[in-house]
Image: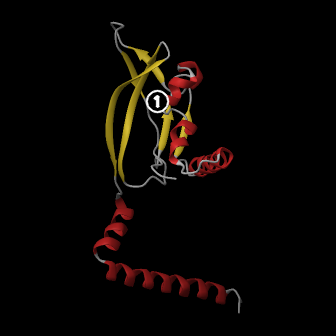
Amino acid sequence: FHHVPTVYLLQTSKRLSALADKEALDRLRMDYRSLLFDSLETGETSRKSFLIDELIKLKEHDRLYQIQEGCIQIKPLSGGSVDQVEVKFPLPARISPGSYALELITFQDGKGTLLQRETIEVQLSGFTDLLHRLAKEKGLLYGFLAVVVAKLGGLGIGSVLTSRGAQ
């Protein structure tokens, strides 16, 4: 595989098949198959299909690939010329820090049009960020602390098991 998106979260206002025909959806790479088909370097179609299915299962299990059809509500604003769309989706716990593209695509008469594209930044925060920075910037100290924590954990578990009569 090459050039596989790390995260693919798709939310729609209707079923994909109701928004446009298969060709238009494939052109916009709106489903997993069209998104991943060119990313595999094998010519054997049955093998390609199997590997793509397995990758999709893995990514869906980690919640990094999600397609949720019919969950977006579109509300017309007063005046009738513009619609309001509000979308909330939690980012998967396994998402890696980095830049991600967020696209808003509208469909009219079966044709998709990109309305807006934004980039969002995902960053570590809190204790996870502290550990990450410590490992990157002060590797020796991080290694020393990891050994101390592992040793204390082992001693703690050993004392609990010994107090309960384990030999």
Q: Locate the C terminus and report the quarter of the image it occupies.
A: bottom right
Percent x, y of residue 132: 36, 67
Percent x, y of residue 69: 56, 29
Residue placed at 65% from the left, 90% from the top? 162
| Residue on which the image places disc 1 | 28
Q: Is residue 109 above or below residue 37?
A: above
Question: Does residue 19 appear anywhere in the picture?
Answer: yes
Between 71 and 48, the one lying in front of the other is: 48
Residue placed at 41% from the left, 26% from the top? 105
Between 9 and 131, the one lying in front of the other is: 9
Percent x, y of residue 15: 58, 24
Between 76 and 97, the one lying in front of the other is: 97
Q: Is residue 46 above or below residue 68?
A: below
Q: Residue furthest top?
A: 79
Q: Is residue 65 above or below residue 166?
A: above
Question: Does residue 15 appear anywhere in the picture?
Answer: no
Classify 10 Å Cα crowding around label 1: few (below 14), some (14-19), many (20 and above): some
Residue 91: quarter of image? top left
